[in-house]
Amino acid sequence: MKKYLSILLVLTFTLSLAPQAVTAAPVMQGVVCEQDVVIQADDWLSNLADKFYGDVLAYPVLVEATNQAYASDNSYARINNADIIEPGWKLCVPSTEDAQAMLTGQASSAMAAASGDPIIFGASLPLTGGFSVNGQKHKEGYELCVDLLNQAGGVLGQPVEIIISDDRSDTETALTMAERLINVDNVDMMFATFSSRLSFPVSAIAQQNNMVYPIPGGGALRIYERGFDNLFYFQPSPAEYVGNSPINLLLDRGTGELPKTAAVVHADDFFANGIANGLIGGEIEVNED
């Protein structure tokens, strides 16, 4: 039963990462544009929300206010997808007071919709040690995911929480932390650690406990050759195919005399070895079972 719940949760997690149609803040009629802003090439709604309101998650305010303004003045943009904006669009920026009122209404609506015992996510991440920079970024991303899910009313009508522990960039610690999340904290679903070196052993713990295991940052094919049916990889290509891409780029786009030799210097770990294998044309085998 828990595995089916985990599959549903990972689908929800996937959708939260994919481009979405706009989830607007509650409509507040008569919002006044305190100022207008014209989208520049490097703008995102989230960084504009941070600039004007100090909160990257306040972007639905800009969407709703701009769409309201568009209804009476088509010089404003019509935003159908918050992930797709174009330079030159004119946006309506309400006052901080109006924005706060809209956000408060959004939070109240979501909290009213989500009730009951929380669904608990768990993640062991390298918050210290050699992978700490990437581990911290994963932590921020996982926490953002949980915040967005709760703002949208939770999952299955229940609020979502996450427990994050530090595996210190160490394999043995990562295994211990994963066992603790499953057997002591009783999490409903696991999010993966970072790096192929840590994901390889920890994914086996998830498999043994019948837990779905989405992996944003573990690209070595060795992780996926064991026939596990609970792993989901959130990157376009595994390491070996990433390594092969510069060769294909040269062959497809290169002009003139192409280089005949190259030096490959890489770390001795799962991910780097996979990239090097793809780069030098090593044979890639994937278990089809």
Image (cartoon, rainbow, N blue to C red):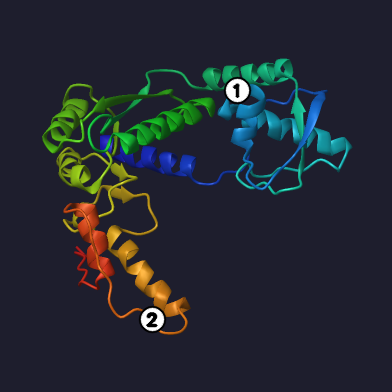
Q: Quadrant of the N terminus?
A: top left
Image label count: 2
**Element type at marker 2?**
loop
Q: The disc labelled 2 sits on which kind of residue?
A: Leu
Give the quarter of the image for residue 169. Answer: top left
Q: Residue furthest left?
A: 172
Residue shown at 16% from the left, 56% from the top:
226
Q: Nearer the viewer, residue 161 or 93?
A: 93
3D distance between C-alphas at marks 1 and 2: 50 Å
Give the quarter of the image for residue 133. Answer: top left
Q: Which residue is mark 1?
A: 54
Q: Residues within 10 Å of mark 1 (few under 14, many from 20)?
A: few
Seen in the image, is 35 located left or right of residue 285?
Answer: right
Instruction: Kindly identify which numbered label has been placed on residue 45.
Output: none
Q: Would residue 242 be seen by someone viewing this image from the given angle?
A: yes
Q: Residue furthest right?
A: 72
Q: Is residue 247 above or below residue 134?
A: below
Q: Which residue is mark 2?
A: 258
Q: Nearer the viewer, residue 8 or 178?
A: 178
Seen in the image, is 25 located left or right of residue 216?
Answer: right
Residue shown at 34% from the left, 62% from the top:
242
Q: Position of residue 110 (x, y in %)?
A: 55, 22
**Element type at marker 1?**
loop
Q: Would residue 1 be seen by someone viewing this image from the given angle?
A: no
Seen in the image, is 141 located left or right of residue 190?
Answer: right
Seen in the image, is 137 located left or right of residue 70?
Answer: left
Q: Position of residue 170 (x, y in %)?
A: 16, 35
Q: Position of residue 114 (x, y in %)?
A: 49, 22
Of labels 1 and 2, earlier in sequence is 1
